[in-house]
Image (spheres, grey):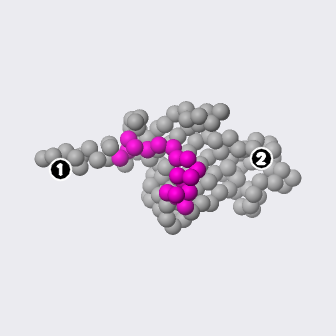
Amino acid sequence: MKKLLFLLMMPILCYGQYKPLSQSEIKEKYPKKVCAYYDNDFNSLFNGSGYDKNHPDASLVHEYICNNFSGDFFMSSCYEEHLRVDNVGNLTPLYDQIKTESRKVVARFYWSENGKLNKTICWNENGEEIDCSN
């Protein structure tokens, strides 16, 4: 009976443990990284290369996204970083999120303008929002 109760509570325990990671934790847990700049329509800019304020794409930049994978690219769990880009290429964190191998978002961490954690949202395996406060 205790084992059954533990198994039923396991998803709740696991989902309650999500937290934003530092850059060193990301590198350790999600070592494979790919980043790109995107416009408002989610088109990749700069031909996949770095920001260049003199490039025609510079005026179109809306967001910079880094996907950090735990294993094979786009086939493993992922810690995703979303950053706003200003007109000179400065980056401001918007939110980070954790995705499963099946690409489902299980946790999202929103950042304030000064870089402090503002809000955390988690979802269960059915896509329902759940409490993930520690």
User: Is 27 covered by the magenta stretch?
Assistant: yes
Q: Nearer the viewer, residue 27 or 10?
A: 27
The percent position of residue 101, horizontal first and vertical second, equals: 45, 59
The percent position of residue 26, horizontal first and vertical second, equals: 54, 53
Q: Which residue is mark 1?
A: 3
| Residue at 55% in and 61% down | 31
Q: Quadrant of the C terminus?
A: top left
- On the question of residue 128 being in view, the answer is no
| Residue at 32% in and 47% down | 11
Question: Seen in the image, is 66 located left or right of residue 54?
Answer: left
Q: Which mark is residue 89?
A: 2
Q: Nearer the viewer, residue 87 or 14?
A: 14
Secondary structure type for disc 2: loop
The percent position of residue 28, horizontal first and vertical second, equals: 52, 58
Question: Seen in the image, is 9 located left or right of residue 92?
Answer: left
Callout 2 touching callout 1 (CB < 8 Å): no
Compare marks 2 and 1 and give the one earlier in the sequence: 1
Q: Nearer the viewer, residue 94 or 133?
A: 133
| Residue at 51% in and 44% down | 20
Magenta span covers which residues?
14-31
User: Is 13 covered by the magenta stretch?
Assistant: no
Q: Residue furthest front?
A: 24
Question: Seen in the image, is 129 located left or right of residue 98?
Answer: left
The percent position of residue 95, horizontal first and vertical second, equals: 58, 42
Question: Seen in the image, is 10 located left or right of residue 97?
Answer: left
| Residue at 43% in and 41% down | 122
Q: Which mark is residue 75?
A: none
Q: Nearer the viewer, residue 84 or 112?
A: 112
Label 1 sits on what residue type?
Lys
- On the question of residue 55 being in view, the answer is yes
Label 2 sits on what residue type?
Gly
